[in-house]
Image (cartoon, rainbow, N blue to C red):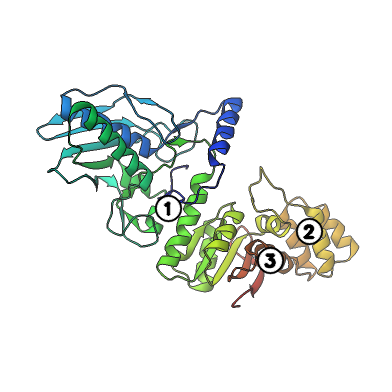
């Protein structure tokens, strides 16, 4: 779900353009097709609508220029011209990315405003409104992110220059069925109410780039800090979220859907600390963190049963048990074997994962505790808070 979150990250690293070029080359090699963000679609629709408002004709297809110079053309899916306003709509194509907004109809309705008004943005049906601080938009603003806003302003100015307009317009962006789609995103948790966000830093959706998920983690931390929530939980899934909530009484805004991206949580907290971080997740995934992996996805890291066998020895396992751990079929089987012999492998994995997390935090004022669970949500290992302030 590449466009599942609200705002883009404001601190894109140096070399991002070169990295994006490398990703594009990789996509060509793998045959994966990139797509376009909701921000790009809204911009193209706004350009078409404003052109029609000034000339009486909708350009179809309509071409826009993205921040990195690409000039995609978009076919119009709907258009309407009335006295003082025009609307154009585009079907979002996310390429080969599993994007929740793929196929959504993005509409931009452009209405003329009095001289000196500039460009004003409104949330139409299916586009959310910001209700909590901590995001790069003030409370009460439509969830149309800064880069799409800038793109729309630039294209409105371009059309005004070409066809003699003033460029003073209201742009209302809407997404058909957006409120329903937003339930599958981070928006409700981040305080974006009523629909989706209009997103995109480059205008391009890179399939399986994981950037949107990581951005959502960062924005979740921003929101928690803004509402003075000083204890957050990075969880690998919904079961571990429920456990973290039950154990610590945490509110929804404290929960970070970390997924496999433990490193993203820790690195962002290193620069933007809170008082306490609870890491909660399945035993197998957190055993990977204990072994030093910051990306817990099965395609990019594996459960190291030899490492677990060594930990079991440290926890008091004899050689026969250690050999059984090393030969186990799954990570969960290793903790079950040890539990049956009174060897606290789960606790040692949690403690080792906590130490790895503290190492990544590099002395940031964040105390860390860890909870390991099985698939049913039963706690099989835990480490008490350690670190500054613990």
At a point 44% along the width and 68% down the height, the residue shown is 251
Which residue is at the far right?
319
**Residue under label 3:** 350
* Distance from Cα at disc 2 to Cα at disc 3: 12 Å
Residue 240 in view (yes/no): no
* Distance from Cα at disc 1 to Cα at disc 3: 27 Å
At a point 35% along the width and 44% down the height, the residue shown is 198
Q: Closer to the N terminus: mark 2 or mark 3?
A: 2
Location of residue 132 (image quadrant): bottom left
Are there few (<14), some (14-19), or many (20+) residues within 10 Å of tag 2?
Answer: many
Q: Please identify, in this view, whether the residue under mark 1 or under mark 2 is nearer the observer.
A: 1
**Residue under label 1:** 186
**Which mark, residue 65?**
none
Q: Is residue 290 left or right of residue 100?
A: right
**Residue under label 2:** 308
Q: Closer to the N terminus: mark 1 or mark 2?
A: 1
Are there few (<14), some (14-19), or many (20+) residues within 10 Å of tag 3?
Answer: many
Are there few (<14), some (14-19), or many (20+) residues within 10 Å of tag 1?
Answer: many
**Label 2 close to label 3 by CB (< 8 Å):** no
What x and y, as percent, mark residue 385? 62, 74
* Distance from Cα at disc 1 to Cα at disc 2: 34 Å
Query: Disc 1 on helix, strand or loop?
Result: loop
What x and y, as percent, mark residue 390? 61, 78
Location of residue 332 (image quadrant): bottom right
Question: Which sits in the foreground, 220 or 281?
Answer: 220
Against 63, is 129 above or below?
A: below
Query: Disc 3 on helix, strand or loop?
Result: helix
């Amino acid at each position: 779900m590449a466009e599942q979150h609200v705002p883009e990250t404001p601190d894109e690293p140096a070399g991002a353009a070169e990295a994006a070029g490398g990703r594009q080359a990789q996509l060509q090699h793998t045959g994966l097709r990139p797509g376009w963000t909701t921000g790009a679609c809204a911009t193209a629709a706004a350009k078409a609508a404003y052109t029609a408002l000034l000339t009486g004709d909708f350009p179809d297809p309509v071409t826009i220029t993205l921040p990195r110079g690409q000039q995609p053309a978009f076919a119009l899916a709907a258009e309407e011209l009335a006295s003082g306003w025009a609307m154009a709509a585009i079907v979002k194509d996310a390429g080969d990315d599993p994007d929740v907004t793929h196929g959504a109809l993005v509409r931009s309705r452009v209405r003329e405003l009095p001289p000196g008004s500039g460009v004003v943005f409104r949330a139409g049906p299916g586009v959310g409104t910001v209700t909590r601080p901590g995001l790069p938009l003030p409370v009460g603003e439509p969830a149309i992110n800064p880069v799409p806003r800038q793109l729309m302003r630039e294209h409105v100015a371009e059309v005004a220059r070409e066809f003699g307009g003033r460029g003073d317009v209201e742009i209302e962006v809407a997404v058909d069925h957006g409120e329903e789609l937003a339930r599958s995103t981070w928006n409700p948790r981040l305080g974006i109410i009523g629909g989706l966000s209009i997103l995109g830093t480059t205008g391009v959706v890179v399939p399986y780039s994981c950037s949107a998920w990581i951005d959502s983690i960062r924005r979740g931390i921003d929101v928690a800090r803004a509402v003075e929530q000083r204890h957050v939980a990075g969880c690998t899934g919904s079961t571990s979220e429920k456990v973290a909530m039950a154990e610590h009484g945490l509110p929804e805004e404290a929960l970070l859907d970390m997924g496999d991206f433990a490193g993203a949580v820790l690195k962002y907290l290193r620069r933007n600390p809170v008082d306490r971080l609870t890491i909660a997740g399945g035993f197998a995934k957190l055993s990977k963190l204990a072994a030093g992996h910051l990306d817990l996805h099965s395609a990019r890291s594996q459960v190291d049963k030899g490492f677990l066998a060594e930990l079991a020895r440290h926890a008091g396992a004899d050689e026969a048990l250690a050999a059984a751990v090393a030969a186990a079929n799954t990570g969960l089987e290793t903790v079950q074997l040890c539990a049956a012999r009174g060897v606290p492998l789960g606790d040692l994995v949690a403690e080792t994962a906590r130490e790895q997390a503290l190492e990544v935090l590099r002395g940031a004022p964040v105390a860390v505790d860890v909870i390991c669970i099985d698939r049913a949500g039963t706690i099989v290992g835990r480490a008490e808070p350690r670190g500054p302030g613990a």
